[in-house]
Image: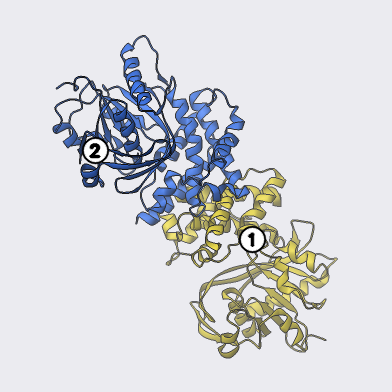
Chain colours: A yellow, B blue
Amino acid sequence: MASKSGKTSVLIVGGGALGSVFGWRLQLGGCLVSVVCRSNYEIVKNNGFQIESGKFGNGVFSPDHVFSSFNAAIAESNFYYDYIMVCTKTLPNISNPANVLMGSPINENSAIVLIQNGIDIEQYFHEAFPTNILISAIAYIDTKQTESGVIVHGEAISLQYGVFIPDQTETRHSTSSVPTNNSILETLEKHLIAGNSGCKILDNVSRDRWLKLVWNSSLNPIAVLSGGSNTKEMLDNPVICNLIVSTMMETISIGEAVCKMPLSPTIASSNIPETLLDSVRKRVKPVYPSMLQDYLNKRPMEHEVILHNAIKRADCVGVNAPILKTLYALIIGAEKKYLN
Amino acid sequence: MASKSGKTSVLIVGGGALGSVFGWRLQLGGCLVSVVCRSNYEIVKNNGFQIESGKFGNGVFSPDHVFSSFNAAIAESNFYYDYIMVCTKTLPNISNPANVLMGSPINENSAIVLIQNGIDIEQYFHEAFPTNILISAIAYIDTKQTESGVIVHGEAISLQYGVFIPDQTETRHSTSSVPTNNSILETLEKHLIAGNSGCKILDNVSRDRWLKLVWNSSLNPIAVLSGGSNTKEMLDNPVICNLIVSTMMETISIGEAVCKMPLSPTIASSNIPETLLDSVRKRVKPVYPSMLQDYLNKRPMEHEVILHNAIKRADCVGVNAPILKTLYALIIGAEKKYLN
């Protein structure tokens, strides 16, 4: 079994708001794109994804192949996937996140690309697939599935990624001992750019994950716990605004102790919260953070990788995390109430 | 105008779950009891309060007089009240709590008894009525109004109180310079005991307020913010249980810095949380803390006196309060959502 000659093959696992838009851009960027869909399988198989994009205009993304399961994606394909992109939610409290790739063998040449929120999300996949190249990726994109197979995308789209190096909190890009990694990262970059997506190869993806967590660990749980408030409702309230800033500063302290360096190469740590909040204030429409969307739809929330894994790291490096611990406990309680 | 000869006269302002039960016991204990009712005025005027009490059995409390306003209670009475007991919620963010006694002159001989939750609740009344004796009281009672004029009371009933001394965080009972205070405190004690209520005169009511706040500042907001959980649901969850203990310890730290002494004369500070939680676990029925009841009924919550005043004190004495600050901001946000 070999990769299909002439085209880079991509399998998107999780054909939701995130996976569909990146799949669309990669197909337009020259890739052969297959998608594993769950609830929207029939609709996408028959009609593709209907995408309304502020940046790209309206379009239809018809994947080269649509599968109803990962097993089918492996069994029914006569070539291997250069990139297996995992775009599912990370819910280790419910099941091992790596289970989405279980049940069928993965080719040793397939790079696994994790496009997921949170901290220390790579551990689950590294344990399950220790010999595959693991790429840790951060998506900067505003997109949601408004009904089955219908995706609304805004203006932003960028994928930032690097190779995950186990047993370190760092990742690397250019290392002489693994020359093969560069071409894997750069081939993906080439297709993303060809598909008009933003793209950045990171030397230290862990550091950038922590920087993104500064947003996620604060706005997400506070949106839920303040009665289900969007960003406009939160930022209009100075008491909640202060709490967001304090939560961001606590997350920055933990991340800097873990990464042993400032989280941003350009922004002073104490200015990160206001810089992030300014970017939120500039948006025309209020943002509904992912946890808030899950809360409003009574779905499980990603509190383990967005809060709990950060708290565990804080305990390891000896940094106090009273706010994150408070938010985590309350989120656990609130989720239990509505999932019951 | 003089107090009615032969009987101690009491005016209960706030004829709800709390005021009705204490009014009932004081009437049985020999007092002439008048009550100011709002929403339940017509029902109470016609039928009295129907009280189902675990401790006392079922009974009807027909106040000697029922008024629809404080002004009516002053204007329509030909005697002054020895005790004006304020049993309303304390919501300084909505209006001055002392407004419940505004609009008609209060006799200089009337003692104002505040039976209210929270910290620094006395300031509002001391400013408005600087020359009246102010008694700060803490109620240990489980009672609720299940429908208009119908009260369900459990087993517990005790009123603990002392004279509020302005510009100090202390109160006093026995002080030679104010011999008159003792008789005011002891007359009330006599009637409470005659009415079969528990009763304790406190030398330092501020300290006891802080001790009660340890319960209120933790269980109240956490019950609301964990999706509306009662005590059983909270204590069944070890993550939430830990948060409750941490919140209690934070409150104890603030209270001890303010009072300049341990909050309990008998329990080591570090054992207070488990002692309180044990008392909750022993209850047959789960407890719905007052803020949770307000939240479930979409009424304003007492976050200012239960959380904000404690936070202000923490800032004054230089004690960190990250958990209380987090809970307060979230409660503010959640309340705003449902009051809108």
- As drawn, the label of residue B36 is 2
Mark 2 crowdedness (10 Å alpha carbons): few <14, some 14-19, many ≥20: many
Q: Residue A118: which numbered mark, if any?
A: 1
Report whether mark 1 lies on the same chain as mark 2: no
What kind of element bears circle 1?
loop
| Residue drawn at point x = 14 percent, y = 27 percent | B78
- In this rendering, the count of numbered labels is 2
The relative height of residue A172 versus residue B216 in the rendered view (above or below) is below
Mark 1 crowd level (few <14, some 14–19, many ≥20, 10 Å Cα): many
Q: Disc 2 residue type?
A: Val
Res. A145 visible in picture: yes
Closer to us: B278 or A276: B278
Kindly identify the residue that appears in the image at 65 percent across and 65 percent down. Answer: A90
* Residue in the foreground of this view, choosing between A26 and B20: B20
Locate residue B57 relative to residue A294 in the image: left or right.
left
Q: Secondary structure at mark 2?
A: strand
Question: Eyeballing the image, is B19 above or below A11?
Answer: above
- The subunit carrying tag 2 is B
